[in-house]
Image: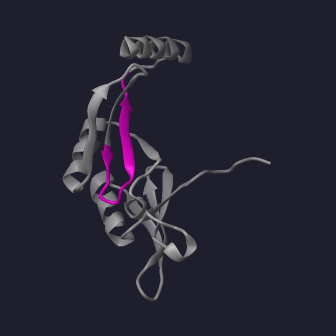
Amino acid sequence: MKIEEVFAYLCVSDADAAIDFYRRAFGVAEKFRLVEPGGRIGHAELAFGAATIMLSDEFPECGIRSPTAIGATPVTIHLHVDDADAMIASALAAGATLQRAAEDHFYGERSGTVTDPFGHRWLIGHAIEAVEPDEMQRRYAAAAKDDAG
């Protein structure tokens, strides 16, 4: 038995508006969507580079609720891009809210965090340095010690 693929599947309060936002913010392409006669999007797929993210409108009758409906999200989606600052600027221009400005981090990445208008949190970063796991752990421990200090 093996895993072939894994997909993030987002629930949003307005799938049509979310698809438009993700196009404008991240430059993604819509692969397709399935729409109920009443207009509710039951399933859509977006191409984030080589990855696919699926999404739907809320289906509260099935327990499928969006972050805005429950007031939080425990999940962060990490977009690894070629220019984090530019992608964050694009997301903000499209209507995202800045949670943490881009900065260089000990683990070899420049990244920042935004929340989209639908309550999903996006960590957007690009590589600035190749850091081996042992060195990353050393830096992490040192940073934690400094924070506790």
State the predominant SS element of the stretch in magenta.
strand
Number of residue marks:
0
Q: Is residue 83 magenta?
A: no
Residue 115 falls left or right of residue 12: left
Residue 139 at x, y = what percent?
45, 13
Return the residue found at the far left.
93
Image location (x, y in percent) of residue 52 = 50, 56
Is residue 7 left or right of 101 when viewed as pictured? right
Viewer-nearest residue: 119 or 71: 71
Q: Residue furthest right?
A: 1
Magenta span: 114-128
**What residue is shown at x 30% (from left), y 61% (from top)?**
21
- In this rendering, is residue 114 above or below 52? above
Tell me residue 27's x, y (percent).
32, 54
Q: Quadrant of the C terminus?
A: top left
Estimate the x, y position of residue 145 in percent, counting from the top left.
Answer: 42, 12
Residue 117 magenta: yes
Q: Given the current orientation, which residue lies at the most extreme front position?
A: 149
Determine the image quadrant of residue 128. Answer: top left
At a point 29% along the width and 58% down the height, the residue shown is 117
Q: Is residue 52 above or below residue 38?
A: above
Q: How is the image coloured?
A: one colour
Q: Quadrant of residue 106?
A: top left
Q: Quadrant of residue 116?
A: bottom left
Residue at image coords 25%, 36%? 85
